[in-house]
Image: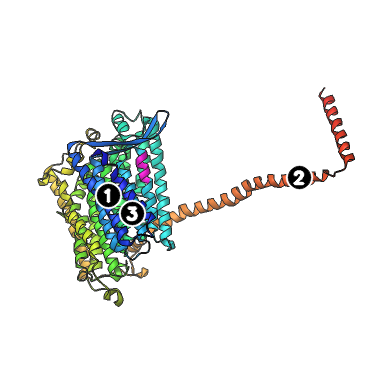
Amino acid sequence: MDNYIWLIPILPFAGFLINGLGRNIFPKSVIGLIGCSAVLASFVLSVLTFIQLNHGEHIEVHMFNWFELDTLKVSLSFLVDRLSVIMMLIITGVGFLIHLYSTGYMHDDDGFGKFFAYLNLFIFFMLLLVMGANYLIMFIGWEGVGLCSYLLIGFWYTNPDYADAAKKAFIMNRIGDLGFLIGIFLLIAFFGSSEFADIFPRAAGMNGSQVPFTLITILLFVGAIGKSAQIPLFTWLPDAMAGPTPVSALIHAATMVTAGVYMIARSNILFTLAPITLEVIAITGLTTAVLAALIAISQTDIKKVLAYSTVSQLGYMFLGLGVGAYSGAFFHVLTHAFFKALLFLGAGSVIHATSNEQDMRKMGGLKGKLKLTFATMLIGTIAISGLPPFAGFFSKDEILSAVFEHSKTMYVIGVLTAMLTSFYMFRMLYLTFYGKFRGTAEQEHHLHESPPSMTIPLIVLAVLSAVGGFIGIPAVLGGRHWLQQWLAPVFQLSAPLLPKTDAVASTEISLMVVSVAGAVIALIYAYLRYVRGSHVPSSDEEERPGLVNLSYHKFYIDEIYDFLIRKPLDGLSVFFYKIVDLFAIDGIVNGFGKVTLGASKRLRLLQTGNVGFYIFVMVLGIIAILVYNIVKI
């Protein structure tokens, strides 16, 4: 089986090449078949790899030596262990469903072939990121998914706003990537290697006096902040909704944005040895979760609600990582991939049915027209709200339980954030599917359920969102928490260094009851306000209360960034362009040219062609040489 692992990333890359080169030649049916088959084949191979790992902890596949520099040797190698294989299943499994969905959603788009080529290329780079056996291979995948994100967000680049959103995502990710790259350089400097197998065991036997783990992990975390949209580098992700809805589901819900969580989970021993960094991660994650939830409660664009929900849920994952609940945070990565991909694809089905309408104020009453879409989105909403027995309940409860042991204050804030999650998600559901239709008569006339290519992925993801949490049933509820046991070898170096969490069963049950009760109270309030009260958010800014208006405008964070960062940088760039570049640098270079040109124009006048004048000048030269020698003596 080891001989075929390299095919897992190569097959989507082959799909990218075939569809990229044949995008204007092949019919759409062939392009869709190639794109979907490549990812499906990778999924099948990932399943076979998963089965093989039941008999071992990891598989290493060495492809070739990339380069050798003094004592540093870097190879193109794959490390498939219990952590990476789960990510491979998510990437290829959910990725295949989104590819299938895209065959219906993008069918009428002129860039159909190019779109599938980009999707396949993204899958390739994401697999490279999680399968790489060293930080440099991970970084190639890391940068590759950033490139694909740029291409897919700006897919409809003729719209200037969409093109700007793509550039924003690209630039903000580069800020984080610089920190990540410097962190990798420091790891190479201190360990003489970029290989996980070399770094992690050696790090486990060291302490902070030998290696500055805090500095290294903070830099690695900066990379995670950019890729996984945490404060302060989170504003690119909501704008990324400019891309087609399948892009939102694949890149900004199920895979790319969880790369930062995966990287920290992979490097867990480094972060465990840097408790200050873990505290920074926990505070950053909690702050991001709260801020994004507060923004989501007032948004009216259905995709923007889901976008800020993604940012908030990512904050939850980082909160889990920060308190040392590595398996719990990764559990939430898994369940979030199911229900958030489902919700984005469900939103796409709604947008498809309402003639590309995204404003929830112009929806309503769709429950009877889009029965399947409604049923699946209801399951996704219940799952993300943390209600049992759906997937989100188990993963969110595990994080909150670990947070409770770490800090009671953080726990209270986490529960309040969970209540906000339940509120804004059911608010979205009620505004979209309940009440009367508020769109145009033309839109109402064309309301219809999506084709099977779009509804089948919804059904599969709905089932996964409903039962996916059963792989992590805690012991207090009679389960064995299969996922925690499965991932135990990955976190075995960190386990002895982390505080023991021996919560009393009654306490754990109480924590579950509190979180579920909070979610139920929030959804009831949303029901009373938006269904019973028939409240529809106003489009008139003056009618919105002050705090709601502040939330609606996203606390003016983009405007603050624009004023404090972009405009000063623009002014500085104008200064360097006009003063430093044009006046100083160009002035000096052009000055030398002008002096040379002016001197040559005057000196050429000495070339008269008169032999007598030349003899006279020669004699003057001889006299000058003689005078110089006499004076020198």
How dense is the environment of label 2, judged by Cα within 10 Å: few (below 14), some, or many (20 and up)?
A: few
Query: Amino acid under label 2?
Result: Ser
Q: Mark 1 points at which residue?
A: 91
What type of secondary structure mainly makes up the magenta span?
helix
Q: What secondary structure is marked by label 2? A: helix
Sequence order check: which comes first, mark 2 or mark 3? 3
Residue 296, magenta (yes or no)? no
Residue at the outermost left position? 478
Q: Mark 2 points at which residue?
A: 600
Residue at the outermost right position? 612
Quarter that holds the N terminus: top left
The reply to whether residue 32 is in sight is yes
Q: What secondary structure is marked by label 1? A: helix
Q: Residue at x 29, y 67 (%)?
A: 352
Res 481 quadrant in image? top left
Q: Where is residue 158 in the image (x, y as percent from the top left)?
A: 43, 63
Q: Position of residue 223 (x, y in %)?
A: 37, 44
What is the spatial separation of the Cα atoms under label 2 and label 1, in whole angstroms?
Answer: 68 Å
Which segment is the magenta one? Answer: 136-142
Please give the label number shown on residue 119.
Answer: 3
The vertical placement of 32 against 127, above or below, is: below
Report the number of discs: 3
Residue 140, magenta (yes or no)? yes
The vertical placement of 134 against 343, above or below, is: above
Q: Do the residues labelled 2 and 3 touch (CB within 8 Å)?
A: no
Q: Residue at x 27, y 76 (%)?
A: 445
